[in-house]
Amino acid sequence: MAQTLPLFLLIICLLLIPSSQIQQEQEAFTTIVISQQGLDFLKNLLITQAISSIIPLKLPNITKTAKFPFLGYVHMLLSNITIYQLQVLDSYVKPGDTGIAIIASGTTCNLSMDWSYEYNTWLFPVEISDKGHASVQVEGMEVGLTLGLKNQEGTLKLSLMDCGCYVKDISIKLDGGASWLYQGMIDAFEEQIGSAVENAITKNLGEGILKLDLFLQSLPKEIPVDDDASINVTFVDNPSLSNSSVGFDINGLFTARKKVPITMYYYENTLPSVLCTEPTKMLGISLDEAVFNSASALYYDAKFMQWIVDKIPDQSLLNTAGWRFIVPQLYKKYPNDDMNMNLSLSSPPILRISEHNLDATVYADLIIDVLEADQVIPVACISLVGWFDGEIETFYNLNHCLLYICAGPYSVLLFLIFYQEL
């Protein structure tokens, strides 16, 4: 019985975890859509980084033994084989149902190498050898890979589903020694050189994708905003792939860095907020109103939404003497005492966003304090209720999507309450 008690208590504790908090962590409130133009930009960036990371690329030595008339068996060696230049003339990226395909065609690469040979023949009783340098140009090479994307415990998992490289044509030019005599001999290495290039590029692409996946796995699930707040960037569900875009759903809510519980204020998932839908744009971001309300609730709980006002343009109004004709009782009870105003929100501001409109409601209390000796005496409280209504308009300028909020009608309702009989 004593052994089952801790297990029973653990089950009770798990049942007491608020279901709304678990649901909040598993919901997506921000959507990021990368259009075809954005994918092309990322593809070009990925190709540039891949080339710079693998060049220069050293290939393994190649040996070959061939039998020639009158010469007998000739032992040939290609060493110090290095790809020192790689150029991609054309490429494209295409998302599909199963993954993202990246194809590079018309690719050329240039190699340098050292060549040597040696043989013995019955014509001459000594060993004959020669060596020199060779340059190789590979043309019409095609490289393709298919990447898989999925959500793995809130992070983005990148996998290499398919990868291949095909060499179409090779041109070899020899320098040094009697190279003009042995060009045909070296041409026999074309197939082996092509195979070495294909294998090396395929292997390095696989290693590069693995490093990129490790980098994505190491990205934090929270991005600090300041000392108090972070943004939850946990991925929710698998990426959505279409024939022209890739979409990601992330939580996107503001969370407290000190792990202080945040009161749930209007966190239900609503309709998507304003999104730049122009097809020529690279990136579109849709923010649910819950993102703004989570920031509002966090900074409210962190006591950021309260202010003490002790300096104003007309400083005489922060002294009871300035109110002696308006509120005589105040001046009579507290003659010539300084005052301040304590402005604080009584609840987090509430934002509601639709496709073309934004409205907000703010509840605030303005407490007027009298500073007498070492005491702070509240004498009056003004309750404020403010409504704001605005119209959202989106303007496009080159590759920028600009969001403007045009202020509409607003109003404030005041309630004045005196704490004491003055």
Image (cartoon, helix red, strand yellow):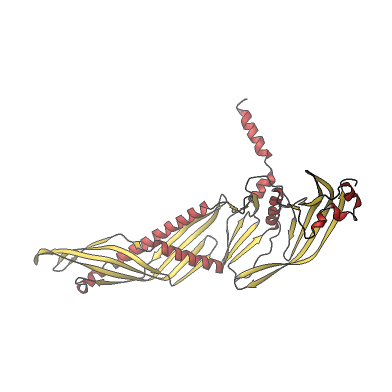
202 on left or right of 398? left
Between residue 218 and residue 236, name the one nearer to us: 218
Where the N terminus falls, by quadrant? top right
Between residue 372 and residue 285, name the one nearer to us: 372
Q: Can you tell which quarter of the image residue 2 is in?
A: top right
Q: Residue 228 location, x and y as percent?
A: 64, 50
Q: Can you tell which quarter of the image residue 59 is in?
A: bottom left
Between residue 30 and residue 146, name the one nearer to us: 30
Q: Residue 304 location, x and y as percent?
A: 70, 51
Q: Residue 286 location, x and y as percent?
A: 65, 61
| Residue at x 67%, y 41% (from the top left corner) | 17
18 on left or right of 155? right
| Residue at x 35%, y 66% (from the top left corner) | 84
Q: Residue 123 location, x and y as percent?
A: 9, 67
Q: Residue furthest front?
A: 336
* Residue 230 sits above or below residue 164 on the image: above
Count numbered badges in the picture: 0
* Residue 2 sits above or below residue 115 on the image: above
Q: Residue furthest top?
A: 1
